Amino acid sequence: MTYEDLKGKRVVITGGASGIGLATAKRFLKEGSKVVIIDINEEGLKKVLSENPGLVGGIKADVSKPDEVS
């Protein structure tokens, strides 16, 4: 299944360094989206970014803390 309308869209994924967040980020990449991931695990972010060069970038932040995402 493909989703042509996702091509070129900008996407931000929380929890993108592992699990469902990472799987979601990879799927958006596959569909041609421009993806940024957010996670509290800095080492995990670095690993995912190095293994997935199509990602636009990664941000270390805890989205449960408003001062880290505002």
Image (cartoon, rainbow, N blue to C red):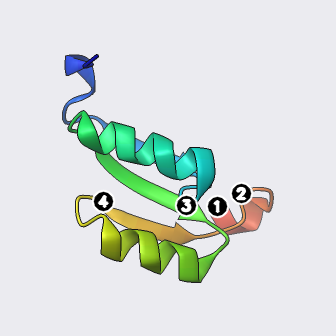
**Front: mark 4 or 1:** 4
**Residue designated by label 4:** 55
Mark 4 closeness class: few <14, some 14–19, many ≥20 residues within 10 Å: some
Measure the C-alpha gap from mark 2 to mark 4: 19 Å
Instruction: Tell me which label, 4 or 3, sits earlier in the chain.
Output: 3
Q: Going 37% across and 47% down the picture, which residue do you hit?
A: 26
Quadrant containing the C terminus is bottom right
Check disc 4 and give the amino acid type: Leu
Query: What residue is rendered at 30% in x and 64% in y?
Result: 52
Q: For the residues labelled 2 and 4, say whether their Cβ atoms are less than 8 Å apart.
A: no
Asked if one can make out residue 17 in the rendered structure from this viewpoint, the answer is yes
Task: Count the numbered circles shown.
Answer: 4
Query: Tags 3 and 1 in contact by the CB under 8 Å rule?
Result: yes
Q: Looking at the image, is 37 positioned above or below residue 51?
A: above
Amino acid carrying mark 3 in the image: Ile
Residue placed under numbered mark 2 in the picture: 63
Q: Distance between the residues labelled 4 and 3?
A: 11 Å
Asked if 53 appears above or below 24 in the picture, the reply is: below
The residue beneath circle 1 is 69
- Marks 3,2: beta carbons within 8 A: yes
Residue 4's quadrant in the figure?
Answer: top left
Q: Is mark 3 on a helix, strand or loop?
A: strand
Q: Do the residues labelled 2 and 1 touch (CB within 8 Å)?
A: yes
Is the residue marked by circle 2 packed among few (<14), some (14-19), or many (20+) residues within 10 Å? Answer: some
Q: Which of 53 and 1 is in front in this view?
A: 1
Report the residue marked by disc 3.
Answer: 38
